[in-house]
Image: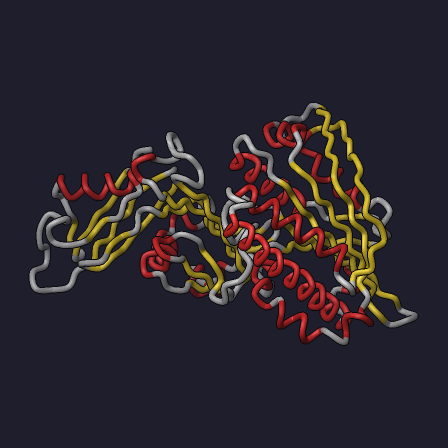
Amino acid sequence: MSAVITSLKYGDVSVTDAGALQRVQTCIENYTPFLVNNKSMGGDTVPGKLKHMVVDYTFNGLTMRRKAAEDQTVNFAVSILKLKYGMEDKFLDYDNYYGSRPQFIQAVYKAIDMKSPFAATNQNLLANPGQDDPTPGKGKRLIIDCIHVINPGRGYPQTGTKDQDYQVLSFETQENGKFFFNTAGSVPQSESGGAGGGTGGGGDQNIWYVDLVPAFIRSDPLLRQAQEDMKSTWALAANRAEQTTKARVGSGEVKDRNDQNAYRAKVCSYGIKSTPWLGLISDTTQPMKFNQPAKDFHKSIINAAVADWPVKLLEHSQWEKILEKMGDTIKLAGTSRPTFLIVMTLYQKDDLANIMRVYIRAFYFPCEEDLSKLVANKSRAENIDISVTCQRIDAEFDSRVFSDMRGRVKEAGADGRNFVEANTVRVDVFD
């Protein structure tokens, strides 16, 4: 894909040297590093002073800006594919905000080039924090997808092989969270490290934690404690899954990214059945069949999933987003079939006992052929047959067992908390 340079400046002076323009354009298109100096820029535009190169260009259909000081290298091997900031249905993205404000794209690229932390704050992501906030007074998420080309000679995506020649990376963090890119801009992570996989290790997200919260208990202190306890539980499982997966990778038993993600999901699902304070109710394998327009599948699958739970109405938009993410993962997987794990947590207030009852339902399933068809045809209005066979696990949280080990669990799972937070969505329910 061709890059179009709309402005190239060096020391605040427009560069007209054809050789310099061609060199920068070639590095953008080939995903290769570019060293900024007088020679590469076609001459010293402001003798005796430190200069910066600023290039504005379009690439992959998106407006970009990169800035680098003299003698600094621009890491064109990493290119942003998506930038979104907000929550639920209220996001600022390239189409409605960042495409016309390249200074924010430049700030993200600076973190990539300098390998420095980037904070997801209104100050860093909004031109006017007081007026541009998409969800005033509410927490937001920063979502960044990018490509990292490992083997520039192979190109992307026309001739490259995923994971060998390029990676598609994705990262999500809550407002005020921070992340940094590892060497060569490889994998974005939280500053505290932690479990990879899912959203932290690449664009192939396959694990979600879904909080189902009735509206009338949203501000209940018991709910906040229960949610914190569940976060600690899932973080411990995610941390153990990451350690186990790394051990399998080291031994050669688990190799490519699909295998790693599938094994990670398997270990997390096993953790639900084996955790002492999660009382196992049932563990079954069941088919889920639908005949309906593909665009309604996300509503039907969640309605079927919670059919016997005490909820009457659900807000579906987050589930549509999960379906989108599943579609992205399926497309990235190529010929192999990824495995998914969706862990739902329903919170119910027991007024007589004055406790918060927490019910867990997990679905662990491979991407079967029908699911691939759904992703390819999800915008079609006519009915299509969908059949998914999955393992369903039901359990109930026992706060009495957990209370004696709350501190130890939180400490042991600390490295997995960022992974859980990034992969958690909330679906409002009404009963």
Tell me where residue 377 sits by quadrant.
top right
Of residue 429 and residue 306, the one placed in the foreground of this image is 306
Q: For the image shown, how many numbered marks are present on the structure?
A: 0
Residue at 83%, 51% (x, y): give it: 311
| Image spot of residue 33 (x, y percent) | 26, 48
Residue at 40%, 52% (x, y): give it: 186
Q: For residue 121, say whether it is visible.
A: no
Q: In which quarter of the image is the C terminus?
A: bottom right
Q: Left of 44 or right of it: where is 160?
A: right
| Image spot of residue 67 (x, y percent) | 27, 55
Residue at 73%, 74% (x, y): give it: 405
In the image, residue 209 above or below residue 336: below
In the image, residue 278 above or below residue 164: below
Tell me where residue 195 sits by quadrant.
bottom right
| Image spot of residue 313 (x, y percent) | 80, 48
Q: Left of 229 or right of it: where is 399?
A: right
